[in-house]
Image: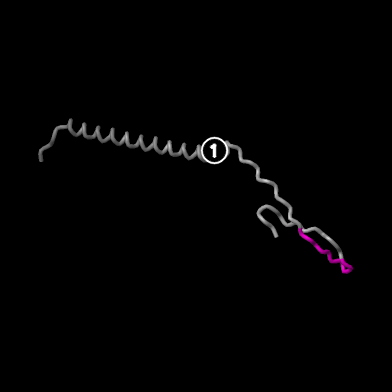
Amino acid sequence: MATAASISDPIPVAVDSAGVTEFVSREVPLAAPAAVPATVALLPQLLSWTAIGLLVFVSGGVIYLSTVEWRDRRRRQAAEPRRRP
């Protein structure tokens, strides 16, 4: 039976007169997982902070441009003569 730390590896023990091989299983330990380099572990964190920074930057730009356009529209409307109905 395989566990998280080993694999079941059947070993032939004996062959009877009918040619049937008997097996006994032994537990073979698996290799330890390789260590993840620090740069690979930090990559998702770096990408998420970059995405957040870009989101804030673009949102700020949209708010700034919207404000400038709104002020300009008010200035143009104030500068044109009013029409009487």
Q: Residue furthest right?
A: 17
Locate residue 55: give its quadrant. top left
Magenta region includes residue 22: yes
**Residue 45: horizontal and vertical position, in percent?**
50, 39
**Residue 28: horizontal and vertical position, in percent?**
74, 53
As drawn, is 45 to the left or to the right of 72? right
Q: Quadrant of the C terminus?
A: top left
Vertical placement of residue 17 versus 32, above or below: below
Q: Amino acid at mark 1?
A: Leu
State the count of labels: 1
Categorize mark 1 by other alpha carbons within 10 Å: few (<14), some (14-19), many (20+).
Answer: few
Vertical placement of residue 70 versus 20, above or below: above
Which residue is pictured at 54% across the width and 38% down the height?
Answer: 43
As drawn, is 38 to the left or to the right of 78? right
Q: Quadrant of the N terminus?
A: bottom right
Which residue is pictured at 71% across the width and 55% down the height?
Answer: 7
Locate residue 26: give its quadrant. bottom right
Front-lying residue, 47 or 20: 20
Front-lying residue, 33 or 62: 33
As drawn, is 81 to the left or to the right of 41? left
Front-lying residue, 19 or 1: 1
Which stretch did the figure color magenta? 16-25
**Residue 38: horizontal and vertical position, in percent?**
58, 37
Front-lying residue, 52 or 30: 30
Q: Secondary structure at mark 1?
A: helix
Which residue is pictured at 43% across the width and 36% down the height?
Answer: 53
Q: Residue furthest left?
A: 84
Q: Residue furthest top?
A: 79
As drawn, is 65 to the left or to the right of 36? left
The residue carrying mark 1 is 42
**Residue 76: horizontal and vertical position, in percent?**
21, 32
